[in-house]
Image: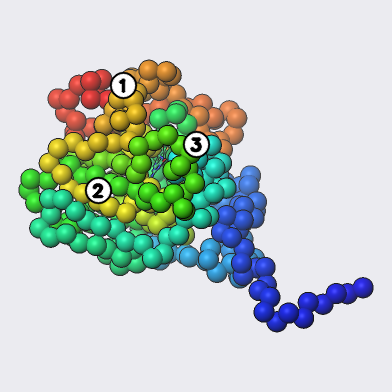
Amino acid sequence: MLIRKSDSNSIPSSEITPRSTYLNRRTLLTAGAVGAAALAADRFGRVMHPHDVRAETKLATVSSPLSTKGLTPTSLYDITHYNNFYEFGTGKDDPAKYAGSLKTRPWSVKVEGLVKSKKTYDIDSLMKLRPLEDRIYRFRCVEAWSMVIPWVGYSLSEFIKACDPLPSAKYIQFISLDNPSEEPGINSVNLDWPYSEGLRMDEAMHPLTLLTFGLYGDALPNQDGAPVRVVVPWKYGYKSAKSIVKVRFVDKQPHTTWNDMASDEYGFYSNVNPNVDHPRWSQKTERVIGAPIWKQRQPTLMFNGYANQVASLYTGMDLRKYH
Ligand SMILES: Nc1nc2c(c(=O)[nH]1)N[C@H]1C(S)=C(S)[C@@H](COP(=O)(O)O)O[C@H]1N2
Ligand SMILES: [Mo]
């Protein structure tokens, strides 16, 4: 017997599919595919689900000469299901499960500290400040795994120029959202919230440092730090703060969450360095997430492969002491 629903108010399920479910479904199509094929399948997936309005947040982008050449991007599935985002729990799959509760609109980023004048940027105007670029970077976590991620954003330096910091500003601090009602990990994970990270001003001004709004051509999935995060490709992953609500210009090295936790394990600089082991494990090699078995173990590169561009920032510094 055919049962018809006569309730005209019922919303087709395709309209209310949560983004996390959508990502799951969409990325099924890309599992096993790599690189351009993954991207093509992903575009195909999008066409297959025209009603997933919330996920249809394709960004207008231009390609960037600062993209790292010759790398195969990790699948969208792995990029969105193997995350560190302790505001949603410590498990790698917790962010994919729970970050759906994060509300990314309205959203604003406050600029404070040593600036000519304090400002607040609405996220949508922040995204329009400069053209958004596609930038493929290596991404290396301190836990000795890595990915290749096709980010979308523009150089943080562009934003810093717009903030007009005073010459006395020597460091920049990033503060992440601290809202237990949307971020269940805040009450269950014993960290000193809000998540705080920082960079020396010359590191922050380096063109590779990316103010990031998206990946794979779309707005950032919540679990990757929506709606705005930073990405510092030559540093361990935790330097790349997610879901930023405040940027502060300061004259002294700011406190950072992981450094507060265990300063011997997580330094302020945290440059990727195969020659300086973490006290509990080697940093000489890394596990490439999603790579075929025979390519899963790779040697870790100095400054994560960006030494030519960034090594000069650290001339004369003892990288063992300032790890
Ligand atoms: N606010 C916030 N930012 C964060 C973290 C976090 O727990 N909270 N984890 C960091 C760590 S350890 C890593 S490896 C990267 C992971 O980014 P991804 O999940 O997008 O790959 O985010 C970093 N930024
Ligand atoms: Mo990490």
Most distant residue in the right direction: 1
Gap between marks 2 and 3 measured at Cα: 31 Å
Q: Does 121 sit left or right of 182 as displayed?
A: left
Crowding near pointer 1: few (<14 within 10 Å), some, many (20+)? few
The residue depicted at 53 percent of the width and 63 percent of the height is 55
Crowding near pointer 3: few (<14 within 10 Å), some, many (20+)? some
Q: Is residue 208 above or below residue 121?
A: above
Of marks 2 and 1, the one in the foreground: 1
Can you tell which quarter of the image residue 7 is in?
bottom right
Tag 1: residue type? Asp
Q: Is residue 279 above or below residue 82?
A: above
Residue at the disc numbered 3? 90
Tag 3: residue type? Thr
Specify the label residue 207 is tagged with: 2
Q: Does 204 sit left or right of 286 as displayed?
A: left
Most distant residue in the left direction: 167
Element marked by disc 1: loop
First in sequence: mark 2 vs mark 3: 3
The residue depicted at 36 percent of the width and 62 percent of the height is 107
Element marked by disc 3: loop
Can you tell which quarter of the image residue 282 is in?
top left
Gap between marks 1 and 3 measured at Cα: 21 Å
Tag 2: residue type? Pro
* Location of residue 112 in the rendering, given as x and y in whole percent from the top left corner: 19, 53
Crowding near pointer 2: few (<14 within 10 Å), some, many (20+)? some
Image quarter in which the C terminus is found: top left
Residue at the disc numbered 1? 264
Gap between marks 2 and 1 measured at Cα: 29 Å
Which color scheme does this rendered protein use?
A: rainbow
